[in-house]
Amino acid sequence: MADSRNEYKNTPLGKIPSNWKIVEFKDVLGYKQPSKYLTKDVNEKSELNLIPVLTANKAFILGYSSDANNVYETEQPIIIFDDFTTACKYVDFNFKVKSSAIKILYARQSDNAKFLYEKLNSIKINTDDHKRRWISEFQEMAIALPPIQEQDKIAEISSKWDNCVELNLRVLNALVRQRNTFIANLMLKSTSSKSIKSVSQVVAKIRNGFTPKPDVLYQEIGIRSHAKGIFHKEPVIGKSLGNKSVFWIEPDCFVVNIVFAWEQAVAKTTEAEVGMIASHRFPMYKPKEGVLDLDYLLYFFKSAKGKNLLGLASPGGAGRNKTLGQSEFLKLKIPVPPIEEQKKIVRLLNTADKEIELQKQKIEAIKLQKKGLMQQLLTGKKRVKVNNI
């Protein structure tokens, strides 16, 4: 007998396996409005007996709620779908939601919700125009649907890949916790009265100002928050800088964005920035040679303790309007152990950061492999072997 897995048929969706059928999402997925399950009671951290509050977007779990009324009880796995962004998540536990933009999708009959989630998640459309999409677009989209046995097998394969990602995320989180604990312990060991110095004692401020020429191109730098480094802006002509005070970048300096210092907008300059400029909002400080290691200083202000100090030196009103006081910054007290100990700390943290980066790359590679495999399985280009097919 011929293997039906090798037989295909032509359809409006292209060639699909002969035993698959064309359906619309509304044929296999029903939806519920989220109104009954909405809550404004969201705490960031988990505690015992609290209810997860979900979003369909990247964060997934926004926090946890003590509101035990009108919890969505997931007897069967469901899909939460953001009506505006079209992001979706597979959910197999009880929850509440915060946004009324969520649609709660459920399998209408015996179809596999995990398979339907993967099918839905594989569809990417332009969402620049801000409108609701499930009823107007998605529910009438045609998809190729395999028999339930094949759905189950594809869902099983997907879950195995998800478990692999989850396992590696746990390894990543453990590495990050280990690194943060290491930093905290180092800072604790370096807090003897002899090692504590004000920033002004260990750095020199660099100010190499100049007047831009109106017809010359200049390239400014910017600094990303959360210690994510320097970026280079597009070159601009000198006259567009107006009366702004600007300075030439000097390499091997600690540089901070005074507007977002409290959000750890800190970095170090390198040879890559030579010839570029910065405004007065990006003061530069050069560590004193033999006293302070630049990478050690940067690591310190990337730590929780360093972030706290930057916040204390950035008074301001509510929200994000908090500007670093440069005189207050120079008064900050930081641990400055002997230079060789600083270099040892930097070497250890560099090693830890490399391990973390490699683990992140591994996770992304696994996700990419899964995505490629799912593209093959969800279209029937690659078949799975199941009984009775």
Image (cartoon, helix red, strand yellow):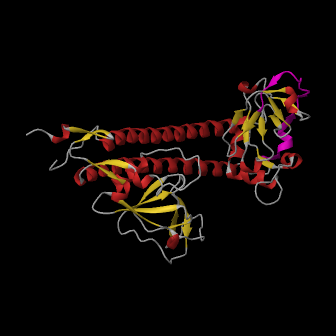
Say which quarter of the image contains residue 274: top right
In the picture, which quadrant includes the N terminus?
top left
Q: Is residue 276 positioned above or below 50 on the image?
A: above
Identify the residue at horizontal 38%, vertical 38% (top origin): 372
> Which of these two is toward me, 209 or 310?
209
For this orientation, the residue located farthest to the bottom is 69
Residue 132 in percent (x, y) is at 53, 56
In this rendering, would 91 be left or right of 247?
left
Describe residue 311's horizontal placement relative to residue 376 as left or right. Answer: right
First to last magenta residue range? 194-220
Residue 247 is left or right of residue 89, and the answer is right
Q: Which residue is nearer to you in this view: 226 or 221?
A: 221
Q: Is residue 150 visible?
A: yes
Is 361 magenta? The answer is no
Quarter of the view holding residue 251: top right
Rendered view: 337 above or below 92: above
Query: Most extreme residue toward the top, as rendered?
Result: 216
**In the rendering, at what x and y percent does residue 198 appear?**
84, 46
Using the rendered image of the protein, determine whether residue 293 is visible from the camera's viewpoint: no
Name the spot of residue 386 as percent of width and height, x first.
Answer: 19, 48
Q: Position of residue 269 (x, y in %)?
A: 74, 31
Query: Residue drawn 66% across and 41% down?
Result: 228
Residue located 24% across and 41% down the image: 17
108 vs 358: above or below: below
The one of 161 and 306 positioned closer to us in this rendering: 161
